[in-house]
Amino acid sequence: MTSDTSPSLADALAAGTIVLDGGMSNQLESAGHDLSDELWSARLLAERPEAVTEAHLAYFLSGADVAITASYQATFEGFAKRGIGHEEAARLLALSVDLARAAARQAGDAGVERPLWVAASVGPYGAMLADGSEYRGRYGLGVDELERFHRPRIEVLAAAAPDVLALETVPDAGEGAALLRAVRGLGVPAWLSYSVDGRHTRAGQPLEDAFAAAADVDEVIAVGVNCCAPEDVEAAVEIAARVTGKPVVVYPNSGEAWDARARAWTGATTFGAGQVKAWQRAGARLIGGCCRVGPEAIAAITSGVR
């Protein structure tokens, strides 16, 4: 687990490849939890927090070095729709970090001796809308408006002292710019990860432009892609590494597609641990999986990179 003597995640990246966890939602669903609510996995922060810790622990025991918190869809606005006030929402956001820390301690008790880190998930504006727009972007909001939306919950998550902020599944370069503004001065490193379609963001901007905004931001220790098709990863890694010179983070989904109307995944799985070597050669240093990628796949990735 992380301790005063453990290396920072940024320092560890200089020494080798770091394995991320897999999808939180699929792990919770496999344990029998209903995530059909608009809050998705964030609902369990209030109703079944122990289930979140169990999901994190499963990934640590499968070889993951980093747990990404269950705060992806946790926002003040989303909680307010369920009658949860600002103070309680802030407590739940901070709790998401505490639950991942608890899983790291339990992993240590179970004999895991390697350093373990916690990444506080910051999902896009579209995740709060719960209508699939995190895969489209172009919300009709400007950078200033998006920064005002993101900054309050990022401040709460940062105060909970995660090892890194995971600015993830970002579909739009404009939202990426807003998130980069929102993390400045908080004293917590971050990674910026876009959801992509080929060599463009989901909103259609060239990845060269989207990644370039992070090149000179000191808080950003890695850039990359997540919750995209596995076949889109390699080209995106090459672009991110070339444009920013920073370590690259990748954690694609299973290759299935999200049907927002049915709130279900459809299509075939194309994710395979055999793809990891190509991602490493292209420059990836933080590697894991997103939606529909479970502990078995993370164990296979671990075997491939160690």
Image (cartoon, rainbow, N blue to C red):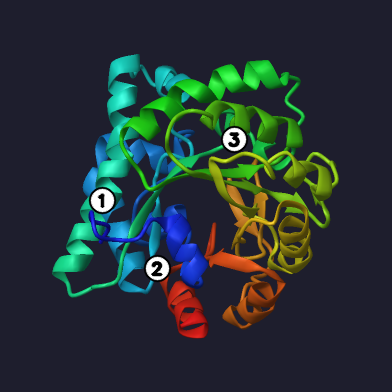
Nearest the eye: 265 or 44: 44
Which residue in the protein does label 3 denote? 124
Residue at screen point 82% across, 43% down: 209
Q: Amino acid at mark 1?
A: Arg
Quarter holding the N terminus is bottom left
Is residue 85 in view?
A: no
- In three-dimensional space, the C-alpha distance between marks 1 and 2, rounded to whole angstroms, equals 14 Å
Q: Nearer the viewer, mark 2 or mark 3?
A: 2
Q: Residue 246 location, x and y as percent? A: 64, 56
Most extreme residue toward the left is: 109
Element at badge 2?
loop
- In three-dimensional space, the C-alpha distance between marks 3 and 1, rounded to whole angstroms, equals 23 Å
Is residue 182 in view?
A: yes
Q: Amino acid at mark 3?
A: Pro
**Which quarter of the figure has residue 180?**
top right
Between disc 3 and disc 1, whose residue precedes?
1
Residue at screen point 54% across, 58% down: 290
Nearest the eye: 58 or 215: 215
Which disc number belongs to residue 146?
A: none
Element at badge 3?
loop
- In three-dimensional space, the C-alpha distance between marks 2 and 3, rounded to whole angstroms, equals 24 Å
Contact (Cβ within 8 Å) of mark 1 with mark 2: no
Q: Residue 238 location, x and y as percent? A: 76, 64
Which disc number belongs to residue 64?
A: 2
Which disc number belongs to residue 101?
A: 1
Element at badge 1?
helix
